[in-house]
Amino acid sequence: MKTFSLLKAAFSQDMNMFKYSTKKNSSKLKKTLFPVMLFILVSIAIGSYAYMIGEKLAPYHLTYVMLSIFIIIVTILTFMQGIFKSQGILFEAKDNDLLFSLPIKKSQILFVRIFKLLSFQYIYNLMFLLPAFAIFVYFEKPKISFYVLSLLMSVLIPIIPTVISSIIGYIIKSSASKFKSKKIMQTLLSSIVFLGIFYLSMNLESFISDIASKATSINDLLTKIYYPLGLYINLITKFKILELLKLLLVNIIPFMLFIFFGAKFYFSIISSSKEVGVKKINHKNNVIQRRPIISLARKELKRYFSSPIYMFNTSFGLLLCIIMSIYLCFKGQKIFDMILASYGVSSNVSLPVLFYFFILFVGAMTSISSSSISLEGKTINITKSLPIKEETILNSKILTCFMIELPFIFFSNILFFLKFKPSIFYIILIILLSFLIIFLSANIGLIINLKYPKMNATNDTEVVKQSASSMISVFFGIGIFIGSILAISFLNQYIKLDLLLIIHLITLLLISIILYIYLLKFGTKEYKNINV
């Protein structure tokens, strides 16, 4: 009964991953319609890719290879999401102190939290798996056993990658707790793990080619990489009860072992990761007076560096910017040619122009401000009670974006300028873009976060990874980047590229000014009306 009560409490706290409004007067239809429509749109997009693959394989009755590909993709996504989601759900939940003070076994608490983590993964995975299963059914017309086995496989798929990613999250958390700056070290370790994954993905073809040369088919390759996948494919092609038992045991046993052994260290890792800082207050005659906007920006920076998931989610692209710039110094334009070639695009553009769009991409996809208001939580009432104008509060959040992003982008710029020595025209363009794209993305993030605040989240993961404001801001960033490329590519037939880039900068400037005026005129009122 205790486990059931814990599950009920855990699932009552924001299990709607696409929830985008916490206002009391929001209609239930509005709250339900958005996630349903989003789920359908993503599923249709995924289904179109599944159909293109299945159409080629169906004449040879090899459509199950399409299922293998999608299950591998889902497994990788589950693993990658689990690394950072485990930080918030398993180790940094706000009810840690309450639950550990109650007469409840640590194994029960760990089971409930990893079950909640699995449930998140399961809902996300369905967006990929349901279209793949539907396309398989369309082409192959399988027996009824396929539906039962596929439902079972959908439940089992997240278990192994979630357990492994939780162990990695545990290692990151325990390693970080040994250092004084635990939060920064935790983010650094998480970034190292993901940069390693990125490096492998960039060189995936060379890693797989050795295995592929020994494999007789793509399916053989994938099933050798991931054993449960091979069991599932064998079951839907030729059912055997022994294979079914293997599939169940190979997923359930690691899960039970993780709960059993993880519970022994669960409390210690959480307690050791708590920061017990004793601040000395000896400033009787040494008071430093700062402007309100500077003090607020310092507060924003402290909040930023106190949240590993917030730092990692926003700084990963910035770290990648530096790494790509260093890589660019060694490989030159080849790195951009390789990336473009992977999408079937041939590059006939100069390196400074490619770097210009690279900075545009990094700035557009880095949205720090889209979570900054929601992360204030209940403390927003304290900030609002201060004798400070709302304009100053919002400006401090924009200033924080500059303080975090500019050092990364400017370091990349300097590397590029020193190595490739572009003309003064492109140096000025790239520097201006660096400022403009940060200002633009900061305004977009704040406006969207004010429109869809999430002030009652139980942990930072819900705000940074599962809120509508973060998601919509990313979509806007993608739209700015893709829209810029399409517009410049089309207009380049009629206007010189250099002039187009100047027009592009002016356009970004005008949009930024309009959004900033809107933010100061209407955003201040929305900020004032936020109630927790």
Image (tube, rainbow, N blue to C red):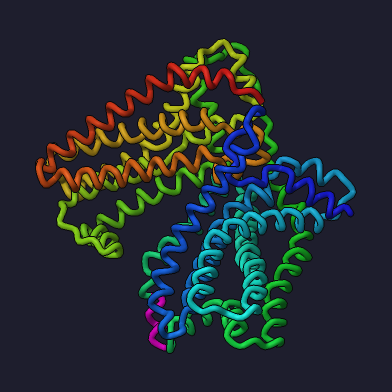
The answer to whether 255 is drawn above or below residue 100 in the figure is: below
Q: Relative to residue 251, is residue 529 drawn left or right?
A: left
**Rendered residue at 37%/25% (across/down):** 515
Quadrant hosting residue 507: top left
Residue 348 x, y percent position in the rendering: 15, 57
Q: Name the image quarter holding the N terminus.
A: bottom right
Residue 210 magenta-drawn?
Answer: yes
Q: What's the residue at 41%, 72% (across, down)?
A: 53
Determine whether 27 is above or below 119 in the image. Answer: above
Residue 54 location (% of width, % of height): 43, 74
Instruction: Relative to 455, say whether 17 is above or below.
Output: below
Near-viewer residue (320 or 177) = 320
User: Magenta stretch: dominant SS?
Assistant: helix
Q: Nearer the viewer, residue 187 or 385?
A: 385
Location of residue 203 by image quarter: bottom left
Give me the residue at 27% from left, 55% from top: 328
Answer with the quarter of the image where residue 93 lies. Answer: top right
Q: Is residue 510 visible?
A: yes
Left of 359 or right of it: where is 188? Answer: right
Residue 309 makes an appearance in the image: no
Q: Quadrant of the C terminus?
A: top right
Total residue callouts: 0
Q: Reply yes or no: does residue 517 show up in magenta.
A: no
Q: Nearer the viewer, residue 295 or 126?
A: 126
- Residue 239, how many percent across, how many down? 65, 86
Q: Residue at x 38, y 77 (%)?
A: 56
- The image shows residue 263 at horizontal and vertical percentages of 78, 59
In the rendered structure, the answer to whether residue 320 lies left or right of residue 387 reads left
Tell whether 11 sits left or right of 154: right
The span picked out in magenta is: 207-214
